[in-house]
Image: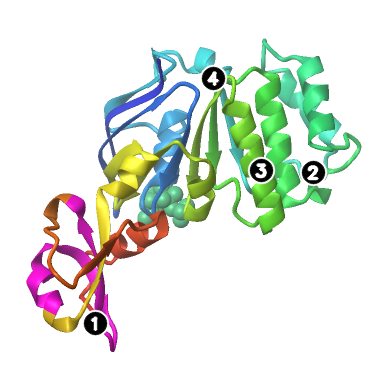
Amino acid sequence: MLVLDIKHLNKHYEHFSLKDVSFQLEKGYIMGFIGINGAGKTTTIKSILNLISMDGGEIHVLGKNITQHEVELKQEIGYAFGDINFYSRSKIKTLTNVVKSFYRNWDDETYRKYLKKFNLIEDKKIAELSTGMKVKYSLALALSHGAKLLILDEPTSGLDPAARDNLLSIFQELVQDGEISILFSTHVTSDLEKCADYITYIHDGQIVNSAEKEAFVDAFRLLNGTKEQLELVKDRLISYKTNSFGFTGLIHTKDFEPSPGIVSAIPNLEEIMIYYSRKEEAYV
Ligand SMILES: Nc1ncnc2c1ncn2[C@@H]1O[C@H](COP(=O)(O)OP(=O)(O)OP(=O)(O)O)[C@@H](O)[C@H]1O
């Protein structure tokens, strides 16, 4: 079953457009939504949450159109982000009382369970929480109203490696029984190597690829060779860098014919993002 189905989403701002964005997320999986700053991740997320109006396309969450069933679907969607600063002088317990009044499926027992699990103390003020704790608090709220789709916008930004690792393990645990699905936007791709099942890559408002993680990276090859060998493949490379030894460049696997001396390897997500975002720049 599809928990999220985005079809031909278009949104135009004066200097930026989402162009025909389409991708799907299956129930029970984690999807990493990657792209460099300004690529359109937050604009896509705001469209899913119906916080901005679309200029074209359709978004279905759990089989229902978000614009037609917004109130109902908001009960099923949990939104968490790395940087909550609202109500920062309030105590956790005060904010929770406000939030829970919006949700008909609020479950106090589940809420207590997650407070304990995440070591959150109700008498603490929001301002006193570390960044990791703020994300955990957002998650506790989302899970207590029975959210089935968690949308996490840069949830790991600003976290130290231990807090980040802890949070990634929590995400994996949450999807384990197949009921919860996670869309996780980030430009810290190493987080996704660990926990994502699917990767969707957006560049300049357009989806480059959306696929199962291994298939996603397998669609690219990172080539290394001499400057002479560069001449043989230059036209087919997405982009490349040269150094005193030769070149390193990214190519679509379908465009690569093995040639003697050119070493090819499967790139990691960061290499794909770096070389892809250099596509429009002058080769250096
Ligand atoms: N309300 C708006 N009016 C005009 N332009 C906007 C508006 N909101 C966003 N944009 C522009 O849309 C582009 C995409 O922004 P968006 O926040 O979706 O990117 P992002 O991928 O989330 O980036 P980041 O990783 O930096 O958060 C940017 O160039 C931004 O300036």
Which residue in the structure is indicated by mark 4? 178
Q: Where is residue 225 in the image (x, y as percent from the top left)?
A: 22, 75
Q: Circle 1 is placed at which residue position? A: 246
Which of pointers 1 and 4 indicates the residue nearer the eye?
1
What residue would you read off at disc 3? 167
Q: Earlier in the sequence, mark 3 or mark 4?
A: 3
Magenta residues, start to end = 229-253
Q: Is residue 82 above or below residue 262?
A: above
Left/right of residue 3 with respect to residue 85 in the rendered view:
left
Seen in the picture, residue 246 relative to 141 is either above or below; the reply is below
Q: Is residue 188 visible?
A: no
Give 161 or 218, whichever is nearer the viewer: 218
Image quarter of residue 168: top right
Q: Mark 2 points at which residue?
A: 126
Q: Which amino acid does label 2 sit on?
A: Ile
Q: Where is residue 14 in the image (x, y as percent from the top left)?
A: 29, 51
